[in-house]
Amino acid sequence: MGIRALLLIAAAGGGGFQLWQMHERSLTERHLHAAADVNGFVPILASDDAPRDTVVILAAINCPKAPAQRAAALEKELARRDIPVLRANTYQVTHFTREQMRLVNQTQAVLAGEIPIVVINGRARANPGVDDVAAEFRSGR
């Protein structure tokens, strides 16, 4: 078998892998969309130390990159609107029940989304707008 044939096989395998990853992402996005409320937030596993009735913004703190800057702007605008907000760079769940297992994939999918990740009372969304966050916060009170 020549080098060209080997390169063609490698390229086909790589292309197939890329297509499979796109398919997996599409299925995850459809599942999240179906589980989302009117503001785009979905149920997730609650963090061990997640405060109630507080918007938790997950993103790097004091970072100059665009996602962290979006998080900082979101935090500032929510505070201006008198919405309790907490900035964090970790989200940890150590205890959950067998009934909550269905939320594991959903939690992982949201947390793998575009930063900032916003969590409010056990519901989360990747990179939401400030109006959606405010509406979600008010709907849960």
Image (spheres, rainbow, N blue to C red):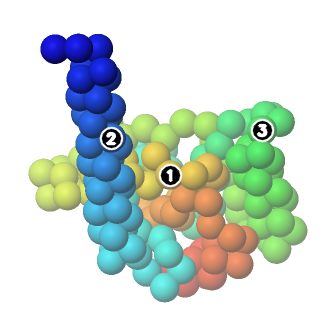
**Which circle marks residue 15 in the picture?**
2
Percent of width and height locating residue 121: 48, 65
Give how far apart the Cα atoms at labels 1 and 2 are. 23 Å
- Amino acid residing under circle 1: Gly
For mark 3, what is the residue?
Answer: 65
Percent of width and height locating residue 12: 27, 36
For mark 1, what is the residue?
Answer: 113
Identify the secondary structure beneath mark 3. loop
Q: Is residue 141 visible?
A: no
Compared to 125, does 86 lie above or below? above
Give how far apart the Cα atoms at labels 1 and 3 are. 16 Å
Question: Which residue is rendered at x = 30% and y = 21% of the image?
Answer: 4
* Label 3, residues with CA under 10 Å away: few <14, some 14-19, many ≥20: few
User: Reading the chain from its start, which is encountered first: label 1 or label 3?
Assistant: 3
User: Reading the chain from its start, which is encountered first: label 2 or label 3?
Assistant: 2
User: Reading the chain from its start, which is encountered first: label 1 or label 2?
Assistant: 2
Percent of width and height locating residue 128: 62, 66
* Label 1, residues with CA under 10 Å away: few <14, some 14-19, many ≥20: few
Question: Which residue is rendered at x = 82% and y = 74% of the image?
Answer: 81
User: Along the horizontal axis of the image, is 63 left or right of 104?
Assistant: right
The image quarter containing residue 74 is bottom right
Compared to 32, does 22 lie above or below? above
- Amino acid residing under circle 2: Gly
